[in-house]
Amino acid sequence: MLHPKKSLGQNFLIDKNIINKIISLKNIKNRNILEIGPGRGALTEKILEKKPKSLTLIEKDYKLYEVLKKKYKNNNKLKLFNSDILKIDLEKIIDIKSIVFGNLPYNISSQILVKLIKFKNWPPKFTDLIFMFQKEVAEKIIGKSFGRLTIITNYRLKLSNKFNVSPNCFYPKPKITSSVLHLSPIKKEINKIKNLDNLEMITNVFFSNRRKMIKKNYKKILGKKGIKNLNLNLRPSDLKSEIYYKITELYEEKL
């Protein structure tokens, strides 16, 4: 039996009820599926039972990759990559209208999500993201704990469904509760940000000190030009996501 590697943030999902609940969030029959970090293949097995059109797996751990390669060597619907999800060109390998599943490593889950949000072509080739996050991170994504991740996610994704998962559902047991989020792309962007790197930079500047008022950083970014009647005696978390999108647009006009 292959043991989880702490260095890769591996916590294998072992609860069959939770696995079935995740799979049932979307009808996957005859659909293209991408799974990030399949591990020992618990979710993979259930996905294949539902008869998808194709299944692409991305697994960084070489030993697990070899196990999966051997197990599914005769399955012509399946493509398997031994790659780092943060380095592989996802936009290139993902099939059209894909549903993306992932029991994501806690330590890089936000980076994976942002990578998908920053796809150059939008609407993207994926129709749904069904991901497992640390509950604390999930709350930042959906805005229960408002911050940078909320703003960046809200720009291109909307929440379809969510539920929490007990530590008892994993091996080894993590010390925290997890959350499954079902996210889908907002097809038409209301705001016209040219480069999402600018939104990342601006939210980083504002949230680098959450307790300070926005006045100094606001003027540093926009100078005298800005949003009419905006109260600058507020903290970063007091502003709505849409204000950050507008600030980014105005910043890009200056470039």
Image (cartoon, rainbow, N blue to C red):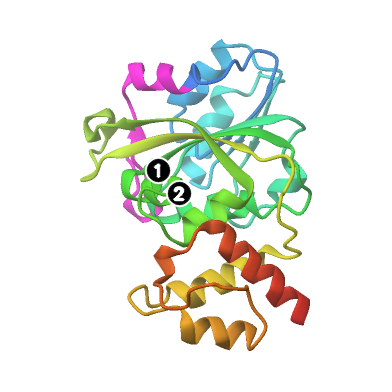
Report, in whole angstroms, how far the alpha carbon at label 1 lies from the one at label 2.
Answer: 10 Å
Give 161 or 240, whichever is nearer the viewer.
240
Q: Quadrant of the N terminus?
A: top left
Do callouts 1 and 2 mark residues in contact (Cβ within 8 Å)?
yes
Image: 8 above or below 77:
below
Q: Image check: 157 left or right of 213?
A: right
Quarter of the rendering containing residue 132: top left
Where residue 204 appears, as percent x and y from the top left, is: 50, 72
Give 128 or 4, whichever is nearer the viewer.
128
Write down the residue under mark 2. 141
Q: Where does the magenta region start and end?
A: 1-22
Write down the residue under mark 1. 133
Mark 2: which secondary structure?
helix
* Residue at (42, 16) in percent of width and height: 20
Q: Image check: 121 left or right of 248?
A: right
Residue 2 shows in this picture: no
Q: Amino acid at mark 2?
A: Ile
Where residue 137 appears, as percent x and y from the top left, is: 38, 50
Image: 148 above or below 134:
below
Mark 1: which secondary structure?
strand
Mark 1 Cα-neighbour bin, 10 Å: few <14, some 14–19, many ≥20: many
Give 6 or 202, whichever is nearer the viewer.
202
Q: Amino acid at mark 1?
A: Phe
